[in-house]
Amino acid sequence: MPSDSVDAAGPAISLEAEVPEVLFDGMRLFIETHPQWDQYRLITSALASFLFQHGSKDACVTQHYLNGLFLR
């Protein structure tokens, strides 16, 4: 997932991960039916949700978590 974008949270890094095919297919189908989402936004939202729900107190994590909940 290469990305050189910069947002309010700062510069982005590139991340490569292997995921089960069923999760990849679910991500692809979700993105196809929700054009306002892309793979970067989906992965960022999922990662922020996981970190927030498992006790992260970082303000940037919280902001990404809330953005994933309320931005459409």
Image: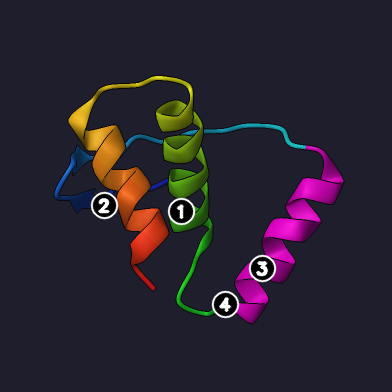
The residues bearing labels 3 and 2 have C-alpha atoms spaced at a distance of 22 Å
Q: Are marks 2 and 1 in contact (CB under 8 Å)?
A: yes
Which residue is nearer to you in this view: 31 or 46? 46
The first of marks 3 and 1 along the sequence is 3
For mark 3, does the 10 Å Cα neighbourhood hold few (<14), some (14 to 19), or many (20 or more) residues? some
- Secondary structure at numbered mark 2: loop
Residue underneath mark 2: 5
Which span is picked out in magenta?
20-34
Q: Is residue 30 magenta?
A: yes
For mark 4, does the 10 Å Cα neighbourhood hold few (<14), some (14 to 19), or many (20 or more) residues? few
Q: Position of residue 72 (x, y in %)?
A: 39, 73
The residues bearing labels 2 and 1 have C-alpha atoms spaced at a distance of 10 Å
Residue underneath mark 1: 40
The residues bearing labels 3 and 1 have C-alpha atoms spaced at a distance of 13 Å
- Report whether residue 65 is seen: yes
Q: Is residue 37 above or below residue 59?
A: below
